Amino acid sequence: MESLWLASFLGNLPALSVASDLVNPQEVIFRAVPTAGPLALARELLAEGTEPFFVLNSDVICDFPFTALLRFHRHHGREGSIVVTKVEEPSKYGVVVCDAETGRIHRFVEKPQVFVSNKINAGMYIFNPSLLQRIQLRPTSIEKEIFPVMAKDGQLYAMELQGFWMDIGQPKDFLTGMCMYLQSLRVQHPERLHSGPGFVGNVLVDPTAKIGMNCTIGPNVTIGAGVVVEDGVRIKRCTILKGSQICSHSWLESCIVGWRSSVGQWVRMENVTVLGEDVIVNDELYLNGASVLPHKSISESVPEPRIIM
Amino acid sequence: LALHPSACLGGMWHHILSSSIFFAYFYRAVPTAGPLALARELLAEGTEPFFVLNSDVICDFPFTALLRFHRHHGREGSIVVTKVEEPSKYGVVVCDAETGRIHRFVEKPQVFVSNKINAGMYIFNPSLLQRIQLRPTSIEKEIFPVMAKDGQLYAMELQGFWMDIGQPKDFLTGMCMYLQSLRVQHPERLHSGPGFVGNVLVDPTAKIGMNCTIGPNVTIGAGVVVEDGVRIKRCTILKGSQICSHSWLESCIVGWRSSVGQWVRMENVTVLGEDVIVNDELYLNGASVLPHKSISESVPEPRIIM
């Protein structure tokens, strides 16, 4: 496996950390394009190889089963395999109807009103390079246009995911997915989680981050590279992205702090407050469900949820 | 002095130690002459005039000047008046510009008659007590108009700040005025140093932790404990309270012996009655909390907790 393509906005860090055990990630494409776009552009690189390649939708999180999927794919020997997961409310999604034994996909049904299946597309695929011949160089949705054809040709198979899965496209769900991911770390790799005085529950801290004195961090917190958390800070159920700073005595719950942002002293942020990249929050403010676009400075409290642009 | 216990004047009474102070505690709302009548025995013994203060006001109580003014005209009673911008909201006092002799009182005048209102501080001769019967009596409504008619009531105009502090919001405004007057007259009584901003009054027995920023406009009472990393602005923290670490308070009144947890945020005229506990990490926005309650959930919108 030589190349790994991720069309990503969030930079799906857990996926990269898993994948890097297997492959060298080659390139990440940052435009919003229909899913087949990146593949077509990568056609040259990918088509050279004879090996199958993975595709991940980075709006999902799970224990990306690279090894199991590769094995499953080789076993049936057809053109493509997708990971599916069971959901409780299939009528909200597009569901996958497949053979219980082999996993061969018969068809896709969008938001079924009667029960046909409770398996949905989990957003992780593996394809043979021959797939690229199916994709034209125009905006193409792989799920809407390519998969149904492959299914009809009997060339698409489904492998059921074991373990947690979450669509993390919305900030609220991103945090829920983060909690699931941390809990799976607790089970599989507890040594990667942080512990000690001032740490509660599942907390993941990059080794280059600095945490001050008298902080209480967790449960369910991830802290990225180079983050500085000053003294007396309380953080619960948050993602603090790389290069950010949380100044002293602040209190954060259920927030996402974007890369290189700075949160002042005595700030209170809660209720899925999201700071984009390079946001500054002045001292002593209260942010309740604020969604702040990148590069903004916030100098007034936001007592009710709204978007700041 | 007939008072109901209001700690807004807590620090003030150090200034009055030369007088005899009798505290009449009334837990029911009684008309103002009630305490006087009950104190009749004590007061009537004397020949000296006695002060009466309505404790819902704050100003630079001009005891000496009022006593001098009262003796000078020699009549039965004197009241302090203060100028306001919107007299139509109040009862106004119409008096002689030269002597201060009060002609009459006019309630909420629609046309301009006067811009002076009763500032809530009085001095009376003991003979006044004979005017008061032992029944609920409002001294302002029933006694003063009669005294004015008799030419026995005079008004002295207050110099300096004055505030009706009956409402919490106004209490804090009055506190700021009082602290500013301290800054002018007795700056040495205010606290200064690293971590203190603007006018801050701290009882000597209070303890303030490290890395706090206190002020402007904060009063901290006896035995209060403020832990590390606390930010307080425009607040009154009453005796025996505790503010735990990393909390942030602005425009609040914290009642006697209350406890505010860690990482709490309180603002917008949040008022804690006596012996209130606020759990860690909560947000109180304009909460009015009755005494002896524990708060275990945030109060995001102003309301009364009972």
Image: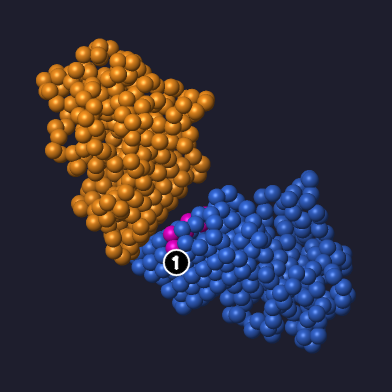
Chain colours: A blue, B orange
Residue B267 visible to an observer of this rendering? yes
The range drawn in magenta is A265-270
**Chain hosting mark 1:** A
Image quadrant in which you'd find residue B118: top left
> Tag count in the figure?
1
Q: Is residue B135 above or below residue B114?
A: above
Image quadrant in which you'd find residue A54: bottom right
Q: Is residue A198 above or below residue B166?
A: below
> In percent of the image, x 49 and y 70: which residue is there?
A245
Q: Along the line of sight, which residue is nearer the eye, A185 or B99?
A: B99
> In percent of the image, x 32 and y 25: which residue is there?
B101
Indicate left or right for B286 with A290 as reference. left
Identify the residue position indicated by label 1 in the image. A247
Q: Along the line of sight, which residue is nearer the eye, B49 or B219?
A: B49
Q: Which image quarter holds the N terminus of chain B?
A: top left
Mark 1 surroundings within 10 Å by alpha-carbon count, few (fewer than 14), some (14 through 19), many (20 or more): many
Q: Is residue A28 above or below residue B118?
A: below
Which percent across, then down, holds residue B104?
Answer: 38, 20
Label 1 residue SS: loop
Q: Along the line of sight, which residue is nearer the eye, A223 or B220?
A: B220
Q: Is residue B47 above or below residue A136?
A: above
Which percent across, then down, holds residue B113?
Answer: 46, 26
Which percent across, then down, holds residue A248?
Answer: 41, 65
